Amino acid sequence: MSPQTDGPDDGRLFEIFFDLVRLGSEPGNEGEVCAYIREFCTALGFAVHEDAAAAATGSECGNLVVRVPAGTFSSLPPVILCAHMDTVKPSDHVIPFDLGDRFVSMSDTVLGADCKAGIASILATVEKLIEAGGPYRALELIFTVQEEPGLVGVQSLDMELVDGKWGVVLDGSGPVGEIVIEAPSQEKLKFTIKGRAAHAGVEPEKGANAIVCAARGIAGIPTGRLDESTTSNVGLISGGVAVNVVPESAQVECEIRSMSDERLEAERERLLGSFEKASQEMGCELVVEASRSFDHFKLDAAATPVHYLARALKESGFEPALAMSGGGSDANVLNSRGLQIAVMNIGLINAHTKEEYILKDELTGVARTVTSLAYMAGEEGSVRA
Ligand SMILES: [Zn+2]
């Protein structure tokens, strides 16, 4: 690696990461992180745009789109680097701590490396690019709100602000080196079962038990991993008012994910069929609300973001490997908007738990890779003419 494409200074990267994890950022409350990024990027001379997602999502701020001009004259469109600003709860008042080889949270919270390791790597990289100069590619930084509650912010992203055609989402648990090129569609189903209340001891015959109906509906379908590309889960259940009352109402919420929309549809029909059958048998009424959360995407192994990310990982000392993920990310939505976006795993361990940590070597490796990507993609015209 040339000195120009060494990653950012470790100390500076860690300082930015600590600054970020100390800021409150539970979903909807991304204002402090947004202000930090805005100030950081404005000081470097970049144009910062905020879209109208605050109004659409109820967040304190919208999504940010930041333009980083190329290091030397170039007519190539910018490469997109995307990370989300929100963190899962509890993540207020995080006290980050250096445990030697890793960073952890000393407070009763998650660390928030998901996804502040991604934001810190991007910010440290662009600062380094400005300092080092040279033929790096123009970048378009996208920072989204409310990714964690189900890709809410990115769905409102103002695509008029986006000039890039391809890029990378920095998110994703698992070792650095993995490039996620496929992730499933997700559909949510909410079943509301209306039975008939009755005194459980005096005249149960008059009742229609909504909870038993829900249980029969659930018992009629398989859950968990259904095949290598399809999963199904019963995630929430509620119902009843008292132990001596035949319950009048019950709610069950499920999700189905699949890499194949055909399989997803078949599972949805099976789920609906099971609840309909139970409702008929039990004399209950069934109300179903179904909604699509996000769409499946699959990138070709030779797609531009995969090609460059693999090269940048290799140059940074990692063994690139292509992977499938069962989770959704901002990449699902960006790909469905016509862009080509791969997901880079950023070394998050135990994400979404208070045991979350990130290895310092992995964090510096992510930043090094992003820096390398910016320079390599700057050569795109000559390499892939
Ligand atoms: Zn994340």
Image: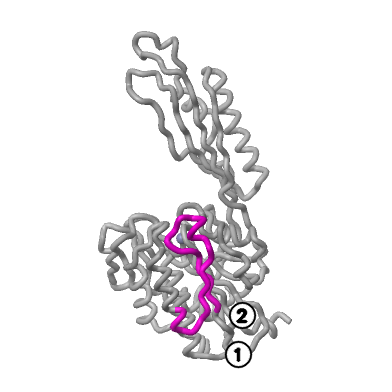
Image vertical order of residue 261 relative to residue 46, above or below: above
Determine which residue is flagged by label 2: 377
Residue 343 in view of the camera: yes
Image vertical order of residue 272 relative to residue 371, above or below: above
Query: Residue 293: horizontal and vertical position, in percent?
Result: 56, 49
Q: Earlier in the sequence, mark 1 or mark 2?
A: 1
- Mark number, residue 72: 1
Q: Mark 1 belongs to which amino acid?
A: Thr
* Residue closest to the eye, 153 or 370: 153
> Label 2's element?
helix
In this rendering, would 371 be left or right of 198? right
Residue 240, located in which quarter of the rendered image?
A: top left
In this rendering, would 361 be left or right of 375? left
75 in magenta: no
- The stretch of residues the image draws in magenta is 41-67
Residue 355 in view of the camera: no
Disc 1 and disc 2 in contact, CB within 8 angstroms: no
Query: Residue 227: horizontal and vertical position, in percent?
Result: 59, 44
* Residue closest to the eye, 385 or 282: 282
Query: Residue 360: horizontal and vertical position, in percent?
Result: 37, 73
Query: Residue 269: horizontal and vertical position, in percent?
Result: 63, 34
Image vertical order of residue 248 relative to residue 321, above or below: above
Residue density around tag 1, few if under 14, some if 14–19, many if 20 or more, within 10 Å:
few
Residue at 41% in and 67% down: 116
Most extreme residue toward the right is 385
Residue density around tag 2, few if under 14, some if 14–19, many if 20 or more, within 10 Å:
many
Residue 373, located in which quarter of the rendered image?
A: bottom right
Residue at 41% in and 22% down: 247
Image vertical order of residue 316 relative to residue 179, above or below: below
